[in-house]
Image (tube, rainbow, N blue to C red):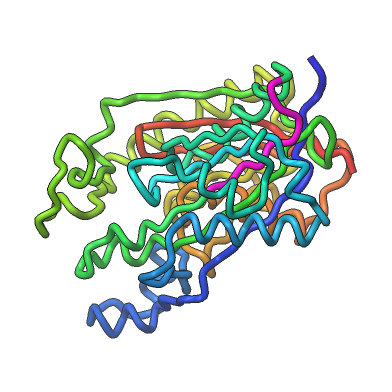
């Protein structure tokens, strides 16, 4: 099987802002410093009422095309990860194909995953290329969780922001995609859920079921239990020792969670990338945004190994290793 690579990477954040100062005004007793120290976020980008996740994904793709001089005609498959679809049907990836000017000969597929979605998308793309189904895959992630959060839910409003990413995956590029470990435990579905709006409970009536519910304690317990073995299994499957990983990029859930995982895994601070201060938790886009920013800041060398790990809603988790070829 030939090697598969990340060939290009970019992202987009909406123009709207929700700062800690604004939140402090809405929730007296929560100072800007207290919010920042608790979740590690100072500013979140928020989509406008008229902006959908697909609009953000479109702009992320446009950034990718411009930054890397990519022609839409070169794309032969679109993978779109979102939990904020424009419609029940059609698939939003079909709409994005037309908007982006990608050929009608391209395949297009939506998949519904959250915080593990980017790594799952890399796995899907690698499989499609390895099976000779596609050659140049555009992986888009986009979510607008802000539209699901109740106005008085100060906990979730401090954590989540909106955003999108775009990645080109090909048989050549700057980072070879390694082997994957994936996992699922549907017993945790009730701990991060929007109950109303789909076919199980179609009607939205203004009740709590219309909005994002997150059991933070259970999500923390799940992450603390499942992620350490996920990292060990990923290292073993890729036949590499932890000492050869030069950077770990985890889903940017919140700083409390990230700090806990770093300490539990014994990862040195200089090898653990965590920076969500100006974005918040953008769900499926946290890893690609962090990867993009870390590359700009740390400038990886050829043969550097970076481990990516996503985890959250589902429950769902996924990890792989990127080896740079620069």
Q: Which residues are magenta?
A: 133-141
Side of 246 where 45 appears, left or right: left
Side of 175 where 86 appears, left or right: left
Residue 273 visible, this orientation: no
Magenta includes 83?
no
| Location of the N terminus (image quadrant) | top right
Can you say whether 181 is above or below 73 in the image?
Answer: above
Residue 125: quadrant of the picture = top right
Residue 279 lies, in percent from the top left, at 52, 65
Magenta includes 139?
yes
Can you say whether 296 is above or below 260 in the image?
Answer: below
Residue visible at 69% across and 36% down in the picture: 137
Residue 27 visible, this orientation: yes
Can you say whether 54 is above or below 326 in the image?
Answer: below
Residue 58 lies, in percent from the top left, at 58, 57
| Total numbered labels placed on residues in the image | 0
Residue 222 lies, in percent from the top left, at 35, 34
């Amino acid at each position: 099987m030939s090697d598969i690579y990340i060939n290009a990477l970019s992202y987009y954040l909406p123009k709207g802002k929700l700062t800690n100062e604004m939140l402090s005004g809405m929730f007296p007793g929560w100072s800007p410093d207290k919010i920042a120290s608790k979740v590690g976020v100072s500013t979140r980008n928020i989509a406008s009422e008229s902006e959908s996740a697909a609009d953000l994904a479109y702009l992320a793709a446009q950034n990718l095309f411009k930054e890397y001089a990519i022609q839409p005609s070169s794309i032969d498959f679109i993978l779109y990860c979102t939990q904020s679809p424009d419609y029940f049907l059609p698939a939003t990836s079909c709409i994005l194909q037309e908007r982006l000017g990608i050929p009608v000969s391209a395949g297009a597929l939506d998949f519904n995953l959250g915080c593990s979605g980017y790594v799952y998308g890399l796995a899907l793309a690698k499989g499609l290329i390895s099976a000779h189904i596609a050659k140049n895959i555009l992986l888009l992630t986009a979510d607008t969780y802000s539209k699901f959060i109740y106005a008085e839910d100060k906990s979730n409003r401090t954590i989540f922001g909106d955003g999108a990413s775009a990645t080109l995956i090909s048989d050549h590029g700057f980072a070879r995609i390694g082997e994957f470990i994936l996992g699922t435990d549907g017993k945790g579905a009730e701990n991060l859920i929007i109950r109303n709006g789909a076919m199980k409970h179609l009607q939205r009536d203004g009740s709590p079921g219309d909005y994002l519910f997150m059991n933070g304690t259970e999500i923390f317990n799940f992450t603390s239990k499942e992620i350490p073995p996920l990292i060990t299994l990923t290292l073993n499957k890729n036949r590499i020792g932890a000492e050869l990983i030069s950077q770990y990029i985890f889903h940017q859930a919140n700083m409390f969670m990230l700090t806990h995982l770093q300490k539990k895994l014994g990862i040195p601070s200089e090898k653990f990338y965590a920076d969500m201060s100006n974005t918040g938790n953008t769900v499926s886009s946290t890893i690609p945004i962090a990867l993009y920013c870390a590359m700009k800041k740390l400038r990886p060398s050829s043969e550097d190994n970076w481990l990516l790990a996503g985890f959250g809603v589902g429950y769902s988790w996924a990890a792989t290793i990127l080896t740079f070829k620069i």
